Amino acid sequence: MRHQSDPRVLNDQTLEKDHKRLVALLRPGVSVLDVGCGTGAITRGIRAVTGDATGIDRDASLVPAEDGFVVSDIFDYAPGRQFDVVTAARVLQWIASPERALAKMVELTRPGGRVVVLDYAHERNEWEPEAPPSFQHFWRAFLRWREANGWDNVLADRLEGMFAAAGLREVVATDDDEVAPGALWQHVMESLGPVVVRDGFLTDLKLMAAREGLAAYGGVQRLALRTAIGVRA
């Protein structure tokens, strides 16, 4: 199964806010490949700094119809060049074979260039204060649905080992947790909730209760994120 991202969530992202560790690696003339670029919000931020950024995504409904954006699965992408930096932010969590995707990213990186991955460890997410039981029920169903599709709910915690296994050196991994308002999960429940219901992990009534419970919730969720950076030999 393929995941489809909510463009409202993607359009709200910025390079400085949502891919902070990448910023320090950018300067004019650095070529960057943004894997899973979605609507291109972060890619445009990269291009504004470097002047050379390409965004790819397999979802044609999201990819901007403008120069520098390509509709392609990472496994099929063959640009005929390598990049100084190849990055994927919140993308590998939706791929059932993340190690294979990382190997392809390494292949697309020039020797001495950097691979940068930012992703989640969903099982370590926390709520402040405790989320309503109705939303917790949705959350557990959401994680089970992800597992059934082969998507790793603790991917961020495995990045260092994955980078080492891919032959990357000078690997540095950093915690980059972020705080998400309830509105984020309302979008997720609206776009993915029906899919979780369709696949039998939740009922319509439970989904409705989760949305109502979250609407009355005044807290936030702390999302467990890590960024890993490695150098291609």
Image (cartoon, helix red, strand yellow):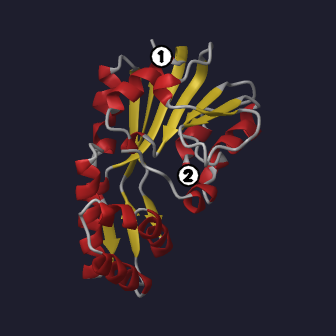
Residue 86 in sight from this viewpoint: yes
Query: SS of the residue at dot 1?
Result: helix
Residue 58 higher or lower than 84, as above or below: below
Is 80 situated left or right of 192 in this image? right
Of 143 and 84, nearer the camera is 143
Of 66 and 17, nearer the camera is 66
Is 117 situated left or right of 49 in this image? left
Query: SS of the residue at dot 2?
Result: helix
Please name the residue shown 26% across and 69% down the image: 202
Please name the residue that numbered disc 1 is placed on.
107
Please name the residue shown 28% across and 46% down the image: 149
Please name the residue that numbered disc 2 is placed on.
18
At label 2, which amino acid type do we have?
Asp
Name of the residue lying farthest toward the front: 198
Of 69 and 217, nearer the camera is 69
Q: Are marks 2 and 1 in contact (CB under 8 Å)?
A: no
Q: Earlier in the sequence, mark 2 or mark 1?
A: 2
Image x and y of residue 123, in percent: 26, 56
